[in-house]
Image: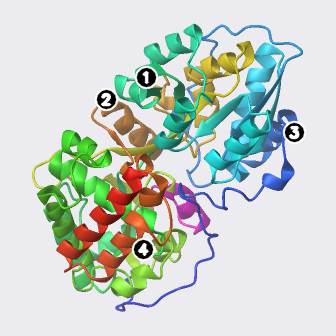
Amino acid sequence: MPLRMRRFRLRSSPVPRAGRRGRSAPAGRNTALGARPLLALATAATMAFTVAGCGGGDDDAAAAGPVPVTVKLPSLKGQRLLVTAVWTGAEQENFARVLAEFEKRTGATVSYVPSGDDMSGFVGSKVAGGQPPDVALVGQVGVLREFAQKGWAKPLGPEAKTQLAKNFSRGWQDLGSYQGTPYGVYFKVSNKSLIWYNTAAFDYAGAKEPKTWKDLLAQAQLISDSGTDAVSVGGADGWTLTDWFENVYLSQSGPEKYDLLAQHKIKWTDPSVTRALTTLAQLWGGKGLLAGGRDGALRTEFPASVTKVYGNAAEPDAGMVFEADFVAGNIADAGADLGTQAKVFPFPAVDGGKPPVVTGGDVAVALRKGEGAQALLTFLASPEAAQIWAGAGGFLSPNKALDVKSYPNPQLRDIAKAVIAAGDDFRFDMSDQAPAAFGGKPAQGEWKALQDFLKDPSDVAGTQRQLEADAAKAYQN
């Protein structure tokens, strides 16, 4: 069926608002449940969840077989552990299956409580009360460093360090360390360098998957000329705009420059930032390229940006949307089929650079001394723990010992392979490395400055001045 020849028609989204990592519900939604025993949750996960949004399994996925025993764990019979993470809903229930396997192998009793989005505040209140969780899964590098600096986080024990060294690249080991001491194990990560497209829109326009930024602009123009807006941007959520910037900057300026900017060792007025913003302006300022125009993009939250591409897959409002692997869940919620109506390609290389691999992730850290917390970190660093959740979908692991056949479909396998193949060349989300006042809060800092830039992409210099003023203040405190 030909696509309707129309533009800028906005549709309300049936998909609930997602959190920073694209969850289908706010992270704090289930906090009233308190700590939950794992048996009921694990049973519910097994019965009710075949991954939101990652498609069905196939013969290759089934070939991964039962979970192997690759690591010896101690007997912890009679011990009780409390674990916290931001995960709720399907994520919480799939993690419950991992923890239930740990209970089975050790005899420990594990309870889980969602932290809400403010992990630092949640853990701080528990530490002040003398009852910190045994293990926390932390979503920001800066928070891990804060916990280590304050003495809340405990260094990895020898067994956990052995698994870490064997199964993870140096880049992931370094991200989980503070001042050279390993504290954390990255268990669940995101590949934030992906562009998802509507196959009907591409076919009708005669568009092809681009390899370079220049080609991306050309394919976007083809889609626009065919009568469908090219790119849906969730500009109402400022974090999506930071991800756009980070991918362009990493490919264009390289990992060393990326690290300097992430640490504010170069200023946001640097010519490399000028270049990246000017590149972004080619798309954000292009006529007819953004769904709803710039004003429409600024009114669109992340879940709705996916719905514009897939809510009516045969006659979409936009041809493609950029964001991480978690978009798959929103595609499923929109009712589209992953693989036939929805496909994905890597973020294209910019100005002769390498295709970028920007990641986010949750790192497990021990907040109490003792054999139980260290045993759980050892288990989470093993491929067998990762395989349990990988088989359910909605999950990526940086564990290079995990068999990619554990993932339930070819799309997830390819996305996971890209994370592993990046070796040490990947970079962690820049805004998640920054102080929260600059990189992690609505209506201020980087989120606000890039929203203002989306509103007026011609003001590169003014945007840089604002970014630098906000960064200088945040990094000084």
Give the camera-side residue of 300 and 460: 460
Give the magenta range: 327-340
Residue 86 against residue 446 in the figure, above or below: above
- Secondary structure under the numbered disc 4 in the rendered image: loop
Q: Quadrant of residue 199?
A: bottom left
Q: CA distance from mark 4 to mark 1?
A: 34 Å
Residue 104 appears in view: yes
Q: Which residue is mark 1?
A: 168
Mark 1 or 2, nearer chain start: 1
Callout 2 crowding tier (Cα within 10 Å): few <14, some 14–19, many ≥20? some
On the image, numbered disc 4 is attached to which residue? Answer: 235
In this picture, residue 270 sits left or right of residue 435: left
121 relative to 138, above or below: below
* In the foreground, 402 or 168: 168
The residue that disc 2 covers is 423
- Which residue is denoted by mark 3 in the rendering? 40
Number of residues whose C-alpha sits closer than 10 Å to that of mark 3, classed few (under 14), some (14–19) or many (20 or more): few
Secondary structure under the numbered disc 2 in the rendered image? loop
Residues at discs 3 and 2 in contact (Cβ within 8 Å): no
In the shown orientation, is residue 351 left or right of residue 126? left
Residue 286, percent from left and from top: 21, 80
Quadrant for residue 12, please give it. bottom right
- Residue at 74% over, 59% down: 29
Mark 1, mark 3: which one is toward the viewer? Answer: 1
Q: What is the distance, in whole Å, between disc 1 and disc 2 at their CAs?
A: 9 Å
User: Which residue type does callout 2 highlight?
Assistant: Gly
Q: Identify the residue shown where x is 39% and y is 26%.
A: 174
Residue type at mark 4: give it. Answer: Gly
Indicate the position of residue 444 as horizontal and vertical percent values.
45, 69
Amino acid type indicated by mark 1: Phe
Mark 4 or mark 1, earlier in chain: 1
Can you give x and y, in whole percent of width and height, for residue 477 in the image? Answer: 43, 52
